[in-house]
Amino acid sequence: MEQPIAGERARLQVLVDLDLIAGLPEVHEPVDLIDERCGPAITVVAHPLGLALLPGLQADFAARPLFDLGLWGDVAFVGLALIPAFFSLTWLALPLWRAAPTVALGGGVVALVVLAVLFELVGLDIAANFVKFAAVTLAGWWFLAFFESVIWVLLVAVLIIPVDTYSVFQGPTKVIVEEQPQIFDALSIAFPLPGEHNSAQLGLPDVLFFALFLGATVRFALRPGLTWVLMTLSFGATLALAVAFEINGLPALPLLSAAFILANGDLIWRQLRSRPPPEPE
């Protein structure tokens, strides 16, 4: 075990990365994949509709000295307050998916990716975070346009569980986080915990699948409200498990998929049973 740093509370690292959430216990030497100069903290994400407002709020939160919540207080704040608050913007943006044509969604993704790259180049990291979030959210809704049946959404929800698990423990996510942190930074979204220097990171694919599953509940007449609640809580649950068992990396998508299936499994089953049999050729 590494020697503790005297007088410094260990950094809680929330990596919902490409598919990852990681937690470091208090007795470990701090490791920050965002900026090694930072002290203890946590990060979360925001969304397209908050692009104009949330960067200012983010900077204000980071600078304002608030009380210390402690390790589990930070976990609770991220899982029960920050994540639901920012993903509420995804909920509010759902009418955009229903109103915008597929071509417009695709064009929006391209435009936002270009804008995010420009922001990164000029050092506007906070703005780039939110633009990336918006781009990946629109990408999830753009992909949804090609799903002709809810069965395809269900298959994706099942298949990403083993894929994500392998990626985190043995595959590309593990390699990127450990050997190419600069790539990790580019493929994740950071948001600071109010009053601290810590941060949690939410990976772009996790945002994409959140948007895809939530949009699917609207397209295929499932349960959008319950799905949103369970999926937002799934990120906090994965974080809590990582911290409780002192695991440096846990895949985030398995619980996200489980939340989608738990909220809608019965309705999906009814739709599949009610489908007419294929006509003989």
Image: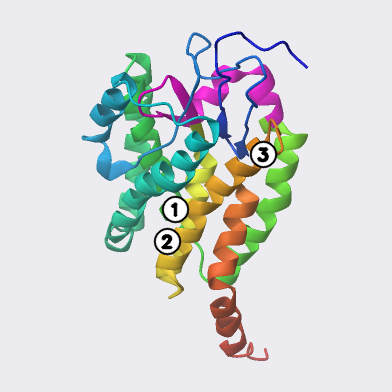
Give the amino acid type for the residue marked by disc 2 in the picture.
Answer: Gly
SS for callout 1 = helix
Residue marked by disc 1 = 211
Q: Quote the CA–CA distance across marks 2 and 3.
A: 32 Å
Crowding near the residue tagged with mark 3, few <14, some 14–19, many ≥20 C-alpha atoms within 10 Å: few
Give the amino acid type for the residue marked by disc 3 in the picture.
Answer: Ala
* Magenta residue check for 87: no
Crowding near the residue tagged with mark 2, few <14, some 14–19, many ≥20 C-alpha atoms within 10 Å: many
Q: Which mark is residue 215?
A: 2
Q: Is residue 27 visible?
A: yes
Q: Quote the CA–CA distance across marks 2 and 1.
A: 6 Å
Q: Which image quadrant is residue 22 in?
A: top right
The x, y position of residue 137, in whole percent, is: 41, 47
> Residue at the spot x=43%, y=75% of the render?
221
Q: Quote the CA–CA distance across marks 1 and 3.
A: 28 Å
The residue stretch that appears in magenta: 174-200
Q: Which image quadrant is residue 101 in?
A: bottom left
The x, y position of residue 21, in whole percent, is: 60, 37
Name the image quarter holding the N terminus: top right
Left or right: 265 as drawn, with respect to 81: right
SS for callout 3 = helix
Marked residue nearer the N-terminal end (2 or 3)? 2
| Residue 203 in the image: above or below residue 97 | above
Q: Which mark is residue 244?
A: 3
Give the amino acid type for the residue marked by disc 1 in the picture.
Answer: Ala
- What count of labels does the image hold? 3
| Cβ atoms under marks 2 and 1 closer than 8 Å | yes
The x, y position of residue 152, in whole percent, is: 59, 66
* Magenta residue check for 182: yes
